[in-house]
Image: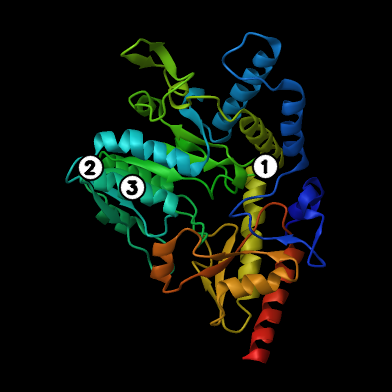
Amino acid sequence: MSNLGAEIREQFPILHQEVNGHPLVYLDSGASSQKPRSVIEAIKRYYENDHANVHRGVHTLGSRATDAYEGARDKVAAFINAKHREEIIFTRGTTTAINLVASSYARSVCREGDEIVITPMEHHSNLIPWQQVAKATGATLKYIPLQPDGTITLDDAENTITDRTKIVAVTYVSNVLGVMNPIKEIAAIAHRHGARLLVDGAQSTPHLKVDVQRLDCDFYALSGHKMCGPTGIGALYGKKELLEKMDPIEFGGEMIDRVDLYESTFKDPPERFEGGTPIIAGAVGLGAAIDFLTEIGMDRIHAHDEYLAKLAYEQLSQIEGLTIYGPRDNRTGIVTFNLKDIHAHDVATVIDQEGIAIRAGHHCCQPLMRWLNVNATARASFYLYNTEDDVARLAAALKNTEDFFNSIG
């Protein structure tokens, strides 16, 4: 049993409302988490008291804004245990971070005959950029195969990654299956073959204690809005020696060193990759979210989310005709399912009438849907503010949905 959700629920203003005449049960944190009052107030304080552009003016407001922005960088670095603060680049989110690596690093190192290795469970944001790199460079895109339960094995990773592999790009936690991949071990395999590892951390950073030095990944991408922060802000971690060799992909103010009429030079990372006015308020909000999560403790959050996912797995497994995808264990915070031959959108629409918000669709994972031999699935994703009662209401609503469609079928 975990009491975390009941303890902190009061700190999330949006959760205290009724939807369609029922108290809201928000089970779509895998798409975007809700925000605690401390994050909302931090953004409000910034705009009311400290807003100015950063790295430019010497006036008081400019100094305050710069301190807040760079302070948030320090918080991100500490949160994922980066070795150097300069290894943290602020981006719009995980998608932008992965595209930065694909466009700047991968296109410079991949040649015809080289390999890029990913898995069939990847979000489109960690698949399409590598398709584009392969098309542009002549590299070959290869996939580590999935086991029947949706996991990958180290033997298969060993057999897929070769001396021709330049990039391995893998999600830490699947946004459909909830499975946690063995990132540290995959990193060791990749490095043994001279390849670099990028980790999609969109679904792992909100739920797990992340240590990029322990994982020994070369790049790690995250999104603020999935970890109690605002939308439009995320970060890329990259090993310092790699970032220093990479060229910028956006050009303009603040990323420059010297500009002449026909040539320009650029600053060192991270400024090299943050051209233009950055996402200042977003960084402030992300920093506040990290403070919030750190105070609670990531180990406690992980245990809570894992507990609710197991509880949901057990209760939903009792519903006749309901199929759950992914492994029974080794999952965090996500339970994806289909109910008989009822389309996932219909399931989500029906239980929304009881105030329960879940995701339905292909979850930006169309190749994985085809591997599962379905067009779409429904997904309940749990986070630190959810409770056992939320799980019970979901199970009851799905049973009611089954009864409803049986009555009209």
Judge left or right: residue 42 versus residue 127.
Answer: right
Mark sitting on residue 297: 1
Q: Identify the residue at image location x=73%, y=53%.
A: 385
Question: What separation in Å lies between label 1 and label 2 (alpha carbons)?
Answer: 43 Å
Tag nearer the camera, 1 or 2: 2
Give the image location of residue 356, x and y in percent: 71, 66
Q: Amino acid at mark 1?
A: Gly
Q: Identify the residue at image location x=49%, y=55%.
A: 180
Q: Identify the residue at image location x=20%, y=46%.
A: 138
Judge left or right: residue 340 versus residue 249.
Answer: right
Give the image location of residue 404, x and y in percent: 69, 85
Q: Nearer the viewer, residue 324 or 92?
A: 92
> Does 364 sit above or below residue 275?
below
Can residue 326 be seen?
yes
Mark sitting on residue 137: 2
Please, what secondary structure does the residue beneath circle 2 have? helix
Q: Indicate the quadrant where residue 192 lies.
A: top left
Q: Nearer the viewer, residue 237 or 26?
A: 26
> Does 152 sit above or below residue 130?
below
Give the image location of residue 355, x and y in percent: 75, 66
Q: Amino acid at mark 3?
A: Trp
How many residues crowd around disc 1 within 10 Å: few (fewer than 14), some, or many (20 or more)? few
Please, what secondary structure does the residue beneath circle 3 have? helix
The mark that comes first in sequence, 1 or 2, is 2
Furthest residue in direction left, as rendered: 113
Question: What separation in Å lies between label 3 and label 1 (alpha carbons)?
Answer: 35 Å
Please, what secondary structure does the residue beneath circle 1 have? loop
Q: Which residue is mark 3?
A: 130
The mark that comes first in sequence, 3 or 1, is 3
Q: Indicate the quadrant where residue 390 lies.
A: bottom right
